[in-house]
Image: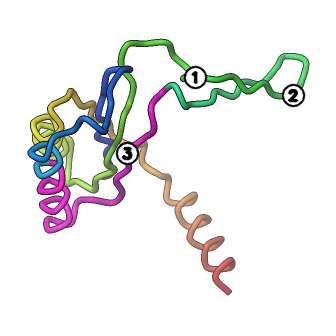
Amino acid sequence: MQFLVAIHLPDDYDPSKENAALMKDISDLNEEMIAKGVRVFVGGLQPATRAKTIRARNTGGMVVTDGAFVEAKEHVGGFWVLECADLDEALEWGKKATVACRAPVEVRGFNPVPPERLRARQEAEARAAH
C-alpha cells in the first residue's frame, strides 16, 4: 500500500538556513528508505509563496492566482511516497521523518486503484511504449 508522508513547514521557512546536521539526518533517512525498499518518490517543494492556484470559473474558463490554495501558517514543504505493508509501518517512517526533518509530518494512505483501472493503465502504458 502506498502512503504519503508530507512535511509541514512554516511559511517563513528558509531552506538556505538548514544546518549540516539536518541535511545529514534527512540524507540518512532517505538512504534507509532506499535500503528497505520503501521509497517510491521523494520531493521538496518551493515555498507556498511561489505556488499558483487554478480555479474554474462558473462562466467557463479558468483563473490563475498567485499563492497557495489555502491561507495558513504552514504548508507542505516536501514529501515522500512510500510503499509500506500497512499504516503502522508508514507511521514508523513518519516518526523517523519527524525527527530527521525537525518538523511535523502527515501520513496518509492513497486510495487503492481498482484492478480494472490498474489493468487499463498498464495496457495504455504498454501501447505508448511501442
Bounds of the magenta segment = 26-48
Residue type at mark 2 is Gly
Residue picked out by circle 1: 67
Q: Residue at x 11, y 48 (%)?
A: 25
Residue picked out by circle 3: 44
Q: Position of residue 124 (x, y in %)?
A: 65, 71
Name the residue at the right extreme: 59
Name the residue at the bottom extreme: 130
Q: Position of residue 122 (x, y in %)?
A: 56, 71
Residue type at mark 1 is Gly
Q: Residues within 10 Å of mark 2 (few under 14, many from 20)?
A: few
Tell me: residue 26, above or below residue 102: below
Residue 61, numbered circle = 2
Q: Residues within 10 Å of mark 1 (few under 14, many from 20)?
A: some
What SS does tag 2 mark?
loop
Whichever of labels 1 and 2 marks the residue nearer the N terminus, that label is: 2
Q: In the figure, residue 129 lies in which quadrant?
A: bottom right
Q: In the figure, residue 103 lies in which quadrant?
A: top left
Compute the Cα span from label 1 to label 2: 19 Å
Residue type at mark 3 is Gly
Which of label 1 and label 2 is nearer to you? Answer: 1
Compute the Cα span from label 2 to label 3: 31 Å
Quarter in which the C terminus is drawn: bottom right
Q: Residue at x 33, y 60 (%)?
A: 40
